[in-house]
């Protein structure tokens, strides 16, 4: 019987694979080095080794859930399809003009993100809609076909169609697409009315173009992956992780692959929410740190916060405003260039700098002995005693202490400090980088860090979580079982989800409530049709109706849940409550205005949820031994007990300092701490006062 669920998460350094039997909780885990030239090669190689090691047959896999950074990388590296754009006459340079806001105000040589479509491939046609959707200039179909023919002749294989105000009336875009599809059936088409039917021409056009840019790649990649899974004997269907923290089927992913740009990081936030709920924690700061980046997400009331837009392919990777705006639903994430592979060096000022560039999978940290020469965070963690060279990835991968120490010594000499200080310097700098980003993100949302527990997933997060939490003033750190593959576990627990949006711009006092109800019904019917094809349990669906509103004259809006009683008084009260939560007060006498209506539909997937059981070798003693580990609060190296976390009985209570090793990660807890093994196998470390 095909009862197992398989999760595959392809990261920058490692590809994580998890097999889960949802009925028994039996779990098998494998980490494979990512193959950047062809990510699916590493995934399929890892699957073969996972099946061999676990004794599970491919025929027993009933479904496959996948997240990948492939499409994001295509945007960043500008390796997408040859993409063209057809737009309203006079508007082809919107992609070039962008926004007037500068992300670095005083930089005279500011580098803005380059458009995905070069100017010769941006074509204009006569047509014009008004903001209310009425036709001012009819669409010239012959001009559309002539421009499409010229683009095809120039080598364009994917085409974005984005007409002015198409969010209010999609007729012109649909007519143009129908004519082009009939004449050029091999041309991939992306319409703004399907991809991002919202106001603001630049973000709408940028999102549609981004979808067109990656769509042919997504179709080829997903077709190949499905074929490879079938060839390996896996009968289960393939599902894709979306940026909104939900799952969808292959056809929807191929239609709008722009929805997958943040799929991997979103899975880490989902894992934080799922493990947090099981531990009885309502407020969690989900901290996912891998080999290349660290991601942080706020989880309130057991659910990660969701935003309706983010930036991709930033010119300055971690600087807001330097990327391409993408209007999709996405888990709110703080991304920092801090991972196990982050490279340490002397800055131009002679200070220690860590990241944001990473050694990645190839050549990797110096201790991997694959040709890396610059010391990294992993090298420092090894030198500090946090990692065990003989038990990296459970002993499946050998790493070496001597080359790491030599590289750290060379860095120390260049900085003019003692060799013994460089390792902790790297560790501390990267921790402060992550803590600083978290402080800002939490403050921007009107929260305080001490109200949260820090939940660590990813190969590197459990090593750093205790010290990051200390910097934030957080007293509780949760390390779930299988933390090193937490994102992949989060994918397996995810529900199917669809987010839909419709433009509706009118002042609240003039709202047509019958029309609003009809719009929500249309959005829900569309969402249900997509979710139905995933096989999710629609009998247990959850539907959230939301609205984007602002005060008349404002340039931006906020999103809030619409109350069941849809009338002006109730909606205004809900909007004002959400506004006050963000800004403290509402402007007196201002008039509220609708901008858009949104709907989010979720439904549980078969084989998701349940329990999670990760066990080690039978009869293994919990205490593996002792080794010197550096704890700054204790003044240096401390002889520290090292535990096999698989062998710790439920309910065990231990005290720090302590090291807990499992195959995919290592949980480091400092002095003055109490560690409790919870009923689900998670470890809760609490700072003692």
Image: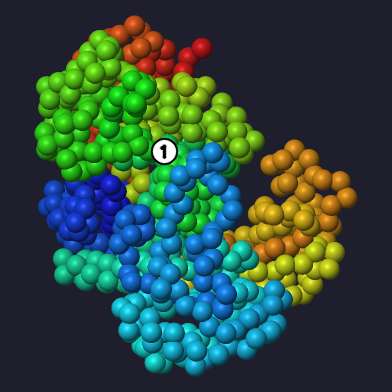
Nearest the viewer among 526 and 653 is 526
Q: Residue at x 42, y 44 (%)?
A: 316
Residue sitting nearer the eye, 557 or 352: 352
Q: Is residue 80 left or right of residue 604?
A: left
Residue displayed at 37% across by 58% down: 75
Q: Secondary structure at mark 1?
A: strand
Q: Which corner quadrant of the image does residue 519 belong to?
A: bottom right
Residue 340 spot, x, y in % from top left = 28, 34
The answer to which of 507 and 86 lies nearer the viewer is 86
Note whether 508 is above or below 54 in the view shown. Answer: below
Q: Is residue 617 above or below residue 234?
A: above
Residue 463 versus residue 324 in the image, above or below = above
Residue 627 position within the rendered picture, expressed as x and y whole percent measured from the top left:
21, 15
Q: Furthest-front residue in view?
A: 108
Q: Residue at x 41, y 92 (%)?
A: 182
Whole-percent x, y for residue 363 in the image? 17, 40
How many badges with numbers are in the image?
A: 1
Disc 1 crowd, CA 10 A, few/some/many (<14, 14-19, 20+): many
Residue 547 appears left or right of 647? right
Q: According to the image, what is the colour scheme of the structure? A: rainbow
Residue ID for mark 1: 336
The correct choice, above or below, for 625 with respect to 615 in the image is above
Q: Is residue 656 visible?
A: no
């Amino acid at each position: 019987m095909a009862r197992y669920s398989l999760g595959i998460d392809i990261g920058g350094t490692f590809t994580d694979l998890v097999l889960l039997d949802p009925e028994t909780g039996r779990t098998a885990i494998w980490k494979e080095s990512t193959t950047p030239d062809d990510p699916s090669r590493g995934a399929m190689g890892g699957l073969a080794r996972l099946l061999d090691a676990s004794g599970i047959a491919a025929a027993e896999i009933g479904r496959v859930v996948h997240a990948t950074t492939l499409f994001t990388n295509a945007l960043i590296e500008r390796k997408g399809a040859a993409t063209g754009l057809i737009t309203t006459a006079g508007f082809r340079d919107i992609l070039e003009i962008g926004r007037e806001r500068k992300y670095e105000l005083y930089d005279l040589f500011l580098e803005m993100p380059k458009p995905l479509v070069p100017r010769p491939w941006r074509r204009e046609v006569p047509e014009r809609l008004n903001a209310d959707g009425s036709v001012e200039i009819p669409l010239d179909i012959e001009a559309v076909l002539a421009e499409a023919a010229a683009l095809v002749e120039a080598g364009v294989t994917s085409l974005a169609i984005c007409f002015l105000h198409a969010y209010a009336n999609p007729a012109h875009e649909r007519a143009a697409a129908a004519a082009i599809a009939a004449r050029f059936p091999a041309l991939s088409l992306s319409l703004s009315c399907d991809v991002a039917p919202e106001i603001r021409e630049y973000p709408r056009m940028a999102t549609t173009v981004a979808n067109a840019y990656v769509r042919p790649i997504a179709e080829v990649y997903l077709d190949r992956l499905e074929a490879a899974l079938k060839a390996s004997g896996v009968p289960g269907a393939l599902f894709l992780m979306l940026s909104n923290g939900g799952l969808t089927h292959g056809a929807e992913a191929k239609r709008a692959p722009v929805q997958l740009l943040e799929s991997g990081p979103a899975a880490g936030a989902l894992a934080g929410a799922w493990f947090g709920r099981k531990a009885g924690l309502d407020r969690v700061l989900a901290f996912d740190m891998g080999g290349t980046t660290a991601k942080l997400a706020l989880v309130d009331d057991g659910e990660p916060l969701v935003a309706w837009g983010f930036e991709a392919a930033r010119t300055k990777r971690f600087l807001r405003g330097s990327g391409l705006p993408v209007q999709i639903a996405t888990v709110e994430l703080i991304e920092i260039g801090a991972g196990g592979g982050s490279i340490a060096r002397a800055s131009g000022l002679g200070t220690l700098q860590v990241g944001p560039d990473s050694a990645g999978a190839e050549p990797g940290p110096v201790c991997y002995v694959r040709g890396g020469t610059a010391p990294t965070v992993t090298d420092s963690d090894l030198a500090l005693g946090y990692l065990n060279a003989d038990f990296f990835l459970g002993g499946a991968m050998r790493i070496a202490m001597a080359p790491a120490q030599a590289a750290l010594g060379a860095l120390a000499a260049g900085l003019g400090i003692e060799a013994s200080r460089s390792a902790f310097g790297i560790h501390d700098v990267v921790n402060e980088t992550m803590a600083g980003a978290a402080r800002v993100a939490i403050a921007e949302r009107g929260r305080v860090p001490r109200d949260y527990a820090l939940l660590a997933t990813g190969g590197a997060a459990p090593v750093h979580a205790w010290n990051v939490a200390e910097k934030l003033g957080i007293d509780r750190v949760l390390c779930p079982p299988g933390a090193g593959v937490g994102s992949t576990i989060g994918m397996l627990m995810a529900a199917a989800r669809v987010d839909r949006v419709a433009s509706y711009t009118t002042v609240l006092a003039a709202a047509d409530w019958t029309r609003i109800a009809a719009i929500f019904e249309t959005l829900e019917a569309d969402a249900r049709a997509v979710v139905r094809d995933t096989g999710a349990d629609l009998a247990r669906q959850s539907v959230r109706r939301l609205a984007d509103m602002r005060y008349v004259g404002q340039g931006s809006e906020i999103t809030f849940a619409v109350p069941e009683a849809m009338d002006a008084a109730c909606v205004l009260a809900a909007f004002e409550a959400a506004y006050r939560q963000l800004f403290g007060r509402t402007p007196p006498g201002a008039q509220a205005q609708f901008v858009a209506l949104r709907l989010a539909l979720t439904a549980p997937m078969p084989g998701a949820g349940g329990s999670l059981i990760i066990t080690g070798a039978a009869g293994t003693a919990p205490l593996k031994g002792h080794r010197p580990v550096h704890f700054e609060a204790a003044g240096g190296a401390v002889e520290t007990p090292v535990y096999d976390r698989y062998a710790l009985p439920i309910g065990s209570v231990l005290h720090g300092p302590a090291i807990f090793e499992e195959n995919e990660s290592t949980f480091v807890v400092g002095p003055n701490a109490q560690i409790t093994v919870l009923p689900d196998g998670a470890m809760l470390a609490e700072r003692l006062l």
